[in-house]
Image (tube, helix red, strand yellow):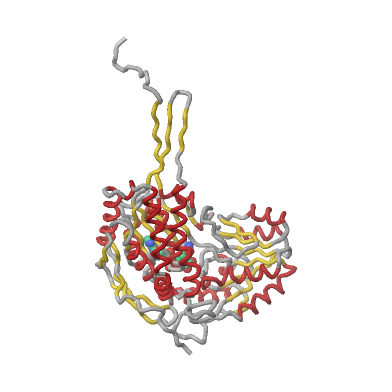
Amino acid sequence: MENFLNPIEPPKIVKSWIDNEESHGSGMELPVFYPATGNQVSILVEDAYKDVDKAVMSARNAFDKSSWRKQSVEKRIEILENCRKLILDNLDELARLECLATGLIFREIKGFHLQRAAYNFRFFAQYISQAHGERFDNTEGYITLVNREPAGVIGLIAPWNAPMALATMKIAAAIAFGNCAVLKPSEQTPFSLVKLVTLLSQVLPPGVLNLVNGRGPITGSCLVSHPGVDRISFTGGTVTGRSVMEHAGKQLTPCSLELGGKSANIIFASADYQRALDGALIGIYSNNGQQCLAGSRILVEQTIFDQFVEEFVERTKNIVVGDPLDDNTEIGPIASKQHLERILSFADVAQHDGDKILVGGRRFSKYQNGYFLEPTAVLAKSNKSRACQEEIFGPFASFISFKSEDEAIAIANDTEFGLVSYVWSDHMPTIMNVSEAMRSGVVWINTPMMRELRAPFGGFKNSGVAREGGYSCEQFYTEEKTVSLPKSPLNLKKFGGGK
Ligand code: TXE
């Protein structure tokens, strides 16, 4: 029986936000759906080139002419703290809006995503309070100072799988370093970010943070190819990331791309078995399975393989799939109909490739209208299977067994991606050897996932370009300027002064 209530009454029409005012785009009207019911709940007005241009010009003006970038660090810290407070003061509404568009579990949005969103502002407030420059003295009597200045106007492109947590990392970093920004949320999940930007306009001067709405190939590509944009920070799929970089490359606009993953979760017989089992389930099924850092390829040492897979499958059958507003729910609906169909197509692909479906692989029969999927696990014929090579981005795990450390390393690295690796073992030499051998930007040992904001996050290979995190963001969102001067007046050679 389907009896889902809307988490909140959404705006009938979703509009954009330019120069601290609501803005009505001149493009198409697009439907927005609630993934739990499949019902259309709102209409989003798409921004066309002229609307994006207006938003970029607003940010440009705020950057070039207003005092934002010259604001004292103390003032900027105060404003960032106020941004944090606005999120915490509006937690429930923001969480409901995010739930409505994404289908993510309300409890997790409120208890984790939004806490992280608020903390992102505090983190960058604290970071800039420690900012420092460099000075070099040389024997020729020169002093050279290296200053970091804000980069300018930043185009921020956010995905749909964790809009608030991911977009606030970009917003907080961009404005903390004195930039102005134009944010484009995913066209599927605009509500919470539109509300956020509206709230932040209470404390940010006009033009510092603008928001445009619309599809990637329309509004998104106008933003990334706009000559008034100085940096692009993008989180999304690898195929789209390539196109973003191609467009940005024409203007030589630097990009930070946080892309997909097909992360190996390597479980050795030397691991704490129970923790590794819990961690493997969290690694693939949390956030409805829709996360770039998911441990989607589960590699288990042969001696414990059968037992591990059997217990994983039993636990998977007990997962509570259902209403994102229900406190007991563990997995909610997939974010969109197209994405549900894409994930389901991998069940056919897997069978075609000779993989065995261990559990799931079908729509969840109890709920026919929303985008629900049975949590799925397959036994892969080999790591060559498409289910092991392509990012499925859903609650869909692939199992592979290995006999030795070397074989585990070879399988783990045999992918176009390189975002995260998980290693479970209590044997220190194994931990050290494997973590060193992983071709990934992040390695988590004996833990499902953790994000240290002071450390870089991002991927090797096709998982990304550049990193997010404290110092990495400082590098990306600022320009370095070298200023050299002599300590005392120079005796310069006099050109043209005669003999
Ligand atoms: O993402 P897109 P999609 C992966 C995941 C998923 C696949 C496709 O595997 O199945 O990507 O998802 C905007 N110029 N991830 O198609 O297209 C778009 O409007 C500028 C991994 O939904 O990458 C949205 O705001 N922008 C991931 C954002 O890009 C463009 C998160 C992401 O959409 C654009 C999401 C263009 N040409 C999906 N085309 C992660 N790394 O966490 C689209 N966009």
Find residue 286 and report its image quarter.
bottom right
Q: Position of residue 4 (x, y in %)?
A: 44, 84
Find residue 16 and report its image quarter.
bottom left
Task: Report the front residue among 458 and 437.
Answer: 458
Identify the residue at horizontal 27%, vertical 58% (top origin): 53
* Residue 164 seen by the camera: yes
* Residue 417 seen by the camera: no
Task: Report the front residue among 442 and 49.
Answer: 442
Identify the residue at horizontal 48%, vertical 90% (top origin): 1
Q: How many dots with numbers? A: 0
Identify the residue at horizontal 39%, vertical 34% (top origin): 483
Q: Quadrant of the C terminus?
A: top left
Q: Name the residue furthest top.
A: 499
In the picture provided, is 29 more to the left or to the right than 238? left
Q: Position of residue 169 (x, y in %)?
A: 44, 59
In the picture provided, is 55 more to the left or to the right than 127? left
Q: Position of residue 277 (x, y in %)?
A: 66, 70
